[in-house]
Image: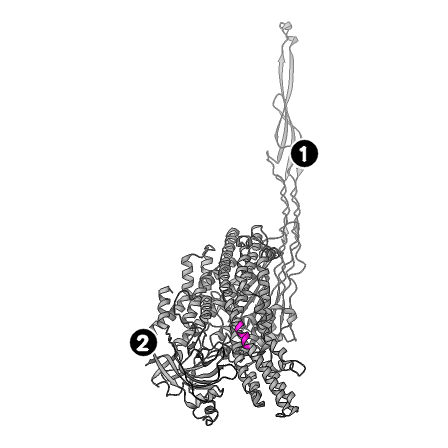
């Protein structure tokens, strides 16, 4: 929403009433006129709240919740077993997977939004699947080869012919010669810790299939090599040698005339044809290797009876044999000849020799078969033991579902769901499940305490009114939204993005930037808190005056008791009893009143404190103890803290912190800041313990005071002093506690951010150097913190909206739609830097609901008109004045119809002014003298709209709205009592109201309520003062429909 809309909302809703009172100092009324007056007429004065039996409506509506099958209640955890890479006769370079699926109601079906079927079906790298849920529905046959499956559920349901098949895959190739075939993979196991199995009673086919894997086929053997083939020169001759004779006549020239002298010269040449070798025999065949046996059937264990026929546990079929392997064919020609031939000079051919040769076929062989046709069958067992089906994963999701029911006001269903978690946890062995179980038990206990005490999810009553207004809550939410959404996006991106290492390093640096911004904001907040310390110191010093005065009163009463005993006014035997009562008064001054807490127990009890009271312990020691409620705070000299803090902070460079990867080094570097803040944190811790020990139930204190009042007249005045002392102390404690709590919280946030920045530096270093990274726990803690904070802001805005407009806020409060959008942005390969467009789309998804609040608010105001403001003056009657002077608290009943007209509806009190205080006094006033008339809203009020009357209340331990005025008897001036501007300024800065002036911080009480009125006197001893009356001006908004 833009700033204009916020301003419009603010000025549309804000209605303020401010005014100045006037005082009149009256004299002349004697003390006797009061003491001698008639007794108080209880019919004209209310000394206790009146009980009304109205037909009221509780503004508590059920909101829409997600179905139990929603993917919000489903989680898939994958652990990689990197040491093992082979499964289903395949190699998986990234290792094998163990998958845990936890949820409330799981559905395994193609296309279902839970996406479980696609995660498992036909996946070959899953070694184990564990399923923990209340119900598991198998709607389609599913194969998870070679996996083991453990199911813990109340019900396991199979639709039609759906089944689960864990049979391992076979071998894609035969064995390699000469190795024998490998044995088929053994099937895994199915363990069913279920309470009920549902399937078609007419079903014949198996529900569970755990057959062994097929054995590997033996090698295919080697066929004999064929004999060599040779060229047949004819008649099977493959080689022939021919010797050819040739002759010539040689003449001698010397004897040319003599014919007898001529001579014949002959020679031979050799010629071959074919190959001088024989066709070879065919080679003998080589048999294939032995096939592998089939794998063993799996193990099936169930803790309920299941028909054996519905489970297949057969051994896997053995691998195939290569069968008969043929020998090689004989060489060709089968009968061959080598010939030697002579050819004389006349061409006559003579075969000198012809050598015959014969080639034969190689031998056939038969390959061996597997030793058995199949592997061993598996194991089937119905265990007689009782196994609880409630797994830790299921209980975690059931608790999440119960919380969603609870936060959306489905109380009875939430109780049923919490009961399931409680029952499941009671059966778990804590020694085995450890931290997670302990965490769940703690979380469950917290919720049970709230829901069984009729509290809502955040610990408030079902009629709860947020302490801050709709405007303030809306502003607080808007202030935090920017940081929270960016934090959520970065955590999700780093965990899920497939980007490069460099990109993730850059994202971690962006995260560090975000944390750095948070540190700077916390630093400013801390400095603002420290600036409030001097004002508190002044109030502490003022309280010391009250303490000294009360101590003098205790001394006076102690002396009075001694005097009365001496003068025999009281029995000496009663002196120890009276001193014991006085010791109780002193002890009461040492405690801190506490209302009934929404959760847990009050730190102490009056009986424990009273045990320390005895005649041997001086009363003043007990009184001095009271000062220790602020000693820790006072001794710190925090007025110098701003200077010290700035000096310590100047030594810290965030850039240097981002380079630190070691906790020890970080500690040393931040030593200056640590040394400064350590005593503060330790002191706050000790003071918190001290205050917790001193907390006593307000009702117990009131009962004790009533007992003391009835003990003796001597205690009448000191009891009034005690009540005044306690009220001032309690106000001081609340204010100091708020400052200290915020100091502690802010310092803790700063150190947590420093630590996270350092952790991220360590993770960046691991990423860059190729080491394993395990930043998920850190990111998940950041994500959970951020989500919880956003949801709480949303809840408070919603409740403030309901109270302001008297309209139910029926939208479900969750972040799923935002997280889905983040997932979409991350999967689209976006960078770690959230673009302005993406940020707008994310914030728009969430603030669209809040924007609808603005639209509906403006529409309501437009339809019904702006509320009207009016004033009414009330006057105290004589009986009420009389009761106040006697120290009684009275009640003004604004519910009765003579105060507000019946036609007025939706009445809200803007302000109450006390005017024209009339007081008479006698005696010397002394250094200071004042009388205050205070009005307090009890926290419970009714608002009427149409024919319905609604009841609303603030928490009993919340700060209540108070009004009133103080008349200074010396100057005659009257001053209004109201909220401290410094406190309002602090709250405004903490919730981020910006510069919007006159923004109403606190929610206004309904007009139909009862106001408690008390008269307080601060007078010196001897001064008598009587309150005679005052006017009470109510300023309120209303509508007439």
Q: State which quarter of the image contains the N terminus.
A: bottom left
Query: Which secondary structure dominates the residues rendered in magenta?
Result: helix
For label 1, the residue is: 355
**Residue 394 coordinates in the image, percent (x, y):** 56, 71
Q: Is residue 306 visible?
A: no
Label 1 SS: strand
Nearest the camera: 367 or 1039?
1039
For label 2, the residue is: 865
**Mark closer to the observer (1, 2):** 2
- Left or right position of 959 against 328: left
**Residue 757 coordinates in the image, percent (x, y):** 54, 57
Q: Is residue 1031 visible?
A: yes
- Left or right position of 458 against 262: left
**Residue 709 coordinates in the image, percent (x, y):** 56, 88
Residue 470 within the magenta-colored segment of the rendering = no
Quarter of the rendering containing residue 616: bottom right
Identify the residue at image location x=63%, y=47%: 223
**Residue 861 coordinates in the image, percent (x, y):** 33, 74
Nearest the camera: 79 or 263?
79
Q: State which quarter of the image contains the C terminus.
A: bottom left
Residue 545 within the magenta-colored segment of the rendering = yes
Quarter of the rendering containing residue 145: bottom right
Nearest the camera: 650 or 15?
650
Which residues lie in the magenta part?
A: 541-546
């Amino acid at each position: 929403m833009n700033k204009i809309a916020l301003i419009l909302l603010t000025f549309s809703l804000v209605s303020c009433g401010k005014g100045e009172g006037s005082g009149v100092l009256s004299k002349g009324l004697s003390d006797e006129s009061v003491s001698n007056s008639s007794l108080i007429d209880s019919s004209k004065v209310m000394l206790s709240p009146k009980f009304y039996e109205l037909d009221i409506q509780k503004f508590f509506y059920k909101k829409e919740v997600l179905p139990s099958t929603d993917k919000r209640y489903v989680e898939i955890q994958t652990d990689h077993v990197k040491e093992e890479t082979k499964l289903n006769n395949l190699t998986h370079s990234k290792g094998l997977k163990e998958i845990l699926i936890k949820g409330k109601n799981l559905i395994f079906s193609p296309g279902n939004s839970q996406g479980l079927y696609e995660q498992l079906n036909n996946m070959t790298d899953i070694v184990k699947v564990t399923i923990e849920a209340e119900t598991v529905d198998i709607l389609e046959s599913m194969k998870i080869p070679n996996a083991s499956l453990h199911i813990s559920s109340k019900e396991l349901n199979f639709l039609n012919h759906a089944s689960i098949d864990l049979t391992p895959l076979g071998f894609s190739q035969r064995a390699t010669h000469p190795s024998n075939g490998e044995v088929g993979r053994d099937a895994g196991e199915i363990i069913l810790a279920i309470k009920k199995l549902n399937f078609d009673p007419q079903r014949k086919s198996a529900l569970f299939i755990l057959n062994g894997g097929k054995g590997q086929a033996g090698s295919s053997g080697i066929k004999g090599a064929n004999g060599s083939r040779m060229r047949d020169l004819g008649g099977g001759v493959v080689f022939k040698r021919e010797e050819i004779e040739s002759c010539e006549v040689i003449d001698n020239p010397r004897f040319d005339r003599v014919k007898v002298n001529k001579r014949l010269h002959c020679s031979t040449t050799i010629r071959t044809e074919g190959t001088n070798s024989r066709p070879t025999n065919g080679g003998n065949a080589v048999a294939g290797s032995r096939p592998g046996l089939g794998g063993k059937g799996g193990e099936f264990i169930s803790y309920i009876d299941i028909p054996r026929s519905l489970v297949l546990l057969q051994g896997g079929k053995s691998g195939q044999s290569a069968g008969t392997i043929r020998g090689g064919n004989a060489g060709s020609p089968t009968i061959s000849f080598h010939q030697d031939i002579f050819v004389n000079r006349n061409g006559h051919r003579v075969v000198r020799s012809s050598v015959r040769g014969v080639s034969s076929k190689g031998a056939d062989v038969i390959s061996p078969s597997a030793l058995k046709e199949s592997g061993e069958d598996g194991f089937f067992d119905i265990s007689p033991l009782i196994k609880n089906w409630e797994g830790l994963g299921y209980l975690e999701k059931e608790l999440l579902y119960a919380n969603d029911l609870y936060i959306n006001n489905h109380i009875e269903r939430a109780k049923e769901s919490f009961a399931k978690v409680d029952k499941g946890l009671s059966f778990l062995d804590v020694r085995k499940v450890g931290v997670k179980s302990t965490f769940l038990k703690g979380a469950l206990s917290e919720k049970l305490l709230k829901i069984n005490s009729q509290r809502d999810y955040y610990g408030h009553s079902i009629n709860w009114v947020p302490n801050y207004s709709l405007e303030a809550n809306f502003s607080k939410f808007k202030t935090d939204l920017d940081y929270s959404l960016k934090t959520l996006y970065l955590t999700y991106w780093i965990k899920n993005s497939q980007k490069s290492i460099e990109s993730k390093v850059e994202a971690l640096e962006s995260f560090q930037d975000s944390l750095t911004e948070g540190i700077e904001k916390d630093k400013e907040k801390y400095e603002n808190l420290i600036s409030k310390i001097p004002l508190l110191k002044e109030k502490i010093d003022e309280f010391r005056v009250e303490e000294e005065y009360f101590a003098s009163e205790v001394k006076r009463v102690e002396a009075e008791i001694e005097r009365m005993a001496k003068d025999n006014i009281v029995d000496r035997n009663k002196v120890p009893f009276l001193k014991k009562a006085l010791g109780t008064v002193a002890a009461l001054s040492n405690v801190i009143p506490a209302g009934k807490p929404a959760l847990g127990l009050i730190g102490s009890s009056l009986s424990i404190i009273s045990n320390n009271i005895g005649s041997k312990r001086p009363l003043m020691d007990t009184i001095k103890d009271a000062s220790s409620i602020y000693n820790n705070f006072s001794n710190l000299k925090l007025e110098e803290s701003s200077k010290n803090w700035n000096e310590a902070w100047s030594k810290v460079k965030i850039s240097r912190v981002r380079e630190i990867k070691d906790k020890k080094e970080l500690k040393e570097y931040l030593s200056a800041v640590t040394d400064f803040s350590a005593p503060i944190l330790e002191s706050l811790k000790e003071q918190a313990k001290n205050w917790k020990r001193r907390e006593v139930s307000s009702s117990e204190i009131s009962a004790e005071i009533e007992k003391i009042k009835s003990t003796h007249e001597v205690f009448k005045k000191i009891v009034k002093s005690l009540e005044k002392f306690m009220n001032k102390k309690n106000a001081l404690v609340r204010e100091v506690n708020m400052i200290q709590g915020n100091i502690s919280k802010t310092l803790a946030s700063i150190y947590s951010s420093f630590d996270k920045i350092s952790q991220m530096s360590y993770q960046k270093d691991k990423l860059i150097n190729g080491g394993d990274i395990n930043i998920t726990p850190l990111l998940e803690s950041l994500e959970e913190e951020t989500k919880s904070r956003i949801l709480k802001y949303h809840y408070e805005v919603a409740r403030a909206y309901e109270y302001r407009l008297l309209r139910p806020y029926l939208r479900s409060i969750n972040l799923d739609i935002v997280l889905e959008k983040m997932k979409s942005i991350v999967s689209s390969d976006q960078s770690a830097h959230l673009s302005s467009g993406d940020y707008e789309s994310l914030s728009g998804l969430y603030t669209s609901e809040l924007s609808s609040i603005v639209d509906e608010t403006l529409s309501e105001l437009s339809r019904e008109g702006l509320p009207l403001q009016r004033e009414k003056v009330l006057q105290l009657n004589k009986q009420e004045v009389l009761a106040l002077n006697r120290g009684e608290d009275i009640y003004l009943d604004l519910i009765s119809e003579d105060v507000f007209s019946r036609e007025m509806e939706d009445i809200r009190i803007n302000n109450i002014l006390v005017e024209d205080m009339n007081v008479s006094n006698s005696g010397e006033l002394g250094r200071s003298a004042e009388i205050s008339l205070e009005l307090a809203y009890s926290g419970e009020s009714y608002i009427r709209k149409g024919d319905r009357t609604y009841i609303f209340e603030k928490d009993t331990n919340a700060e209540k709205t108070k009004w009133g005025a103080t008349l200074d008897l010396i100057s005659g001036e009257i001053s209004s009592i109201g909220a401290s501007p410094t406190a309002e300024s602090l709250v405004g800065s903490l919730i981020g109201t910006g510069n919007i002036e006159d923004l109403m911080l606190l929610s206004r009480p309904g007009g139909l309520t009862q106001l408690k009125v008390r008269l307080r006197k601060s007078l010196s001893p001897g001064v008598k003062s009587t309150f005679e009356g005052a006017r009470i001006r109510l300023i309120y908004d209303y509508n007439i429909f």
